[in-house]
Image (spheres, rainbow, N blue to C red):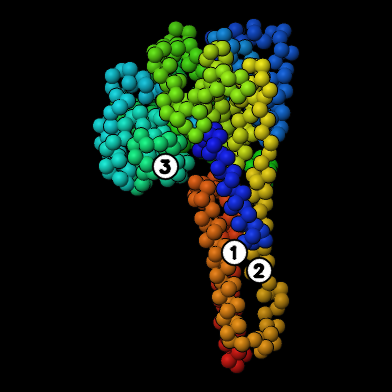
């Protein structure tokens, strides 16, 4: 779930502050590898101190986010000039430039490249309706479905809402046809805007693009990527299929649990390859960046024409931050004004970023084996800041958002307060209520019960709607923010239990008032 869109994150933080207050009030509220390793080694030999500032900065950002392991690659002048591993993977092994990670939404530029290969082969027209290639494709609005083009999907202007990713994503489905099955499930999604009307980042749209490539190429999407992109570029540890995931022994990533990184050993997700489940090592991703900077060519293998590459890296539409091309975000590097082509990505447990500076023929790749959805900008600092250092600018250091730290504890505190409310009658001894009932009128008992039940149900409803107010769902919260998600579930369950308990106690009090006991 995760392009680094600055304006969107500012809005999210504002909503988080408002909703957290509501919760608190309610409840107490590289180019490297066998053929390319030598140039890297030559560049590194005797020059370790040259990169110490970059290494120290990246290491500091990893410490700031409690990330257990990461890999860094730096490209200059058409070659990988620096590589480094930091820390350990999810199985306690030392991270190296060959350690495989999952890349999250950095998969999208790979999918964009695959689509453009089909365009250059004459099998796909960017401005043709998607239904011309996938007759079964549709949203809940059939007319809108008919007008969505391939370009709309690539540029996130199809009208498919960002939240649709929650409908079809993170299902960890590896059955045959899983990708097409996920895309078919968009039939129940209402469009948020007309096709071409506005930018709305949509992983769901990229799932459709993957299904399109499968259909026109006649090959499973992961197989296509290997045969046409990953293998030709020599990406030896690339992951695009469940078999790759098993062969490379991809270690668990880490989610945050009350601020501590906890391994999350999720299975692979074939249904999510086009938008989030491509993976590989820092050296693999460096080879992709080298091809992108080299006009689609790396060591004699041309995966796309120079014109096609330039088109993918050109800003086609305004996005929430900078502009968006055909799979890439396009903008300027803060502090330098230099043109920047980049993408970040995240999955529960992983974060990845590629920052390319085409005018100076540089790139920075950072892969991390941890992620926190509410601290996304902090995770992005490692790559952005390293790129700024290379360009002679001050590196970005995002301060910790106190809301991100407080929200899990607020959810837990609310659940605790509700638990005390549920336990209160037992703590006061239920038999002792008899004397108290004698001095109360029937009206007072009913009014108190109605107020208590209404408040408890209101808290439950507020918490139930909280994830959707942030653009997600409760299952997504459980996956991406498990401490917050389970805190919300516990609080919702206890609020409902409290409403039932207060109803039962009121009924018992009324019965006793009538002389029943």
Which residue shows up at 51% across the image and 18% down it?
289
Q: Where is residue 250 in the image (x, y as percent from the top left)?
A: 56, 30
Horizontally, is 84 left or right of 231 in the view?
right
The label number, if any, that marks residue 494 in the structure image: 1
Q: Nearer the viewer, mark 3 or mark 1?
A: 3
Q: Which comes before the other along the chain, label 2 or label 1?
A: 2
Cα–Cα span, label 3 and label 2 = 39 Å
The residue under label 2 is: 421
Q: Which comes before the other along the chain, label 3 or label 2?
A: 3
Which residue shows up at 57% across the image and 81% down it?
446
Residue 265 falls in which quadrant of the image?
Answer: top right
Q: Mark 2: which secondary structure?
A: helix
Which residue shows up at 62% across the image and 12% down it?
81
> Can residue 110 be seen at all in this image of the molecule?
no
Cα–Cα span, label 3 and label 1 = 33 Å
Q: Where is residue 43 in the image (x, y as percent from the top left)?
A: 64, 8
Q: Which comes before the other along the chain, label 3 or label 1?
A: 3
User: Label 1: few (<14), some or many (≥20) within 10 Å?
Assistant: many
Mark 2 near mark 1, Cβ–Cβ under 8 Å?
yes
The residue under label 3 is: 161
Q: Where is residue 120 in the image (x, y as percent from the top left)?
A: 33, 17
């Amino acid at each position: 779930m995760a392009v680094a869109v600055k304006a969107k994150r500012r809005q999210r933080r504002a909503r988080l502050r408002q909703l957290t207050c509501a919760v608190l009030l309610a409840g107490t509220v590289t180019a490297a590898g066998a053929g390319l390793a030598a140039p890297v080694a030559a560049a590194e030999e005797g020059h370790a101190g040259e990169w110490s500032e970059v290494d120290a900065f990246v290491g500091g950002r990893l410490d700031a986010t409690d990330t257990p392991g990461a890999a860094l690659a730096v490209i200059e002048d058409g070659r990988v000039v620096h590589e480094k591993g930091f820390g350990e993977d999810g199985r306690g092994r030392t991270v190296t430039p060959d350690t495989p990670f999952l890349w999250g939404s950095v998969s999208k530029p790979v999918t964009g490249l695959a689509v453009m290969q089909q365009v250059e082969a004459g099998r796909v027209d960017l401005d043709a309706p998607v239904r011309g290639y996938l007759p079964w494709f549709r949203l809940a609005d059939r007319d809108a479905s008919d007008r969505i083009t391939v370009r709309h999907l690539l540029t996130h202007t199809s009208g498919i809402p960002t939240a649709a990713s929650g409908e079809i994503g993170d299902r960890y489905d590896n059955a045959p046809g899983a990708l097409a099955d996920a895309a078919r499930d968009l039939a129940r999604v209402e469009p948020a805007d007309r096709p071409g009307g506005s930018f709305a980042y949509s992983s769901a749209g990229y799932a459709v693009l993957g299904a399109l490539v499968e259909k026109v190429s006649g090959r499973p999407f992961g197989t296509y990527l290997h045969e046409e992109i990953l293998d030709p570029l020599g990406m030896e540890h690339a992951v695009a299929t469940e078999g790759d995931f098993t062969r490379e022994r991809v270690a668990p990533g880490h989610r945050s649990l009350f601020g501590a990184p906890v391994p999350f050993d999720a299975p692979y997700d074939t249904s999510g390859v086009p938008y989030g489940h491509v993976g590989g090592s820092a050296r693999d991703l460096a080879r992709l960046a080298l091809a992108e900077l080299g006009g689609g060519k790396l060591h004699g293998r041309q995966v796309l024409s120079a014109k096609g590459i330039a088109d993918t890296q050109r800003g086609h539409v305004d996005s929430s931050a900078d502009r968006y091309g055909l799979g890439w975000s396009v903008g300027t590097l803060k502090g330098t004004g230099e043109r920047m082509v980049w993408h970040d990505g995240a999955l529960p447990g992983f974060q990845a970023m590629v920052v390319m500076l085409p005018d100076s023929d540089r790139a920075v790749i950072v892969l991390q084996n941890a992620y926190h959805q509410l601290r996304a900008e902090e995770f992005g600092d490692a790559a952005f800041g390293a790129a700024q250092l290379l360009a002679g600018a001050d590196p970005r250091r995002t301060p910790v958002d106190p809301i991100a730290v407080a929200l899990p504890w607020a959810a837990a505190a609310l659940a605790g307060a509700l638990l005390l409310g549920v336990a209160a009658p037992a703590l006061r001894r239920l038999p002792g209520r008899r004397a108290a009932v004698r001095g109360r009128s029937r009206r007072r008992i009913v009014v108190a019960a109605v107020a208590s039940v209404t408040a408890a149900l209101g808290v439950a409803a507020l918490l139930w709607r909280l994830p959707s107010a942030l653009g997600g769902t409760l299952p997504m919260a459980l996956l991406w923010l498990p401490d917050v998600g389970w805190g919300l579930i516990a609080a919702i369950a206890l609020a409902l239990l409290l409403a039932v308990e207060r109803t039962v106690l009121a009924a018992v009090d009324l019965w006793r008032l009538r002389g029943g006991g």
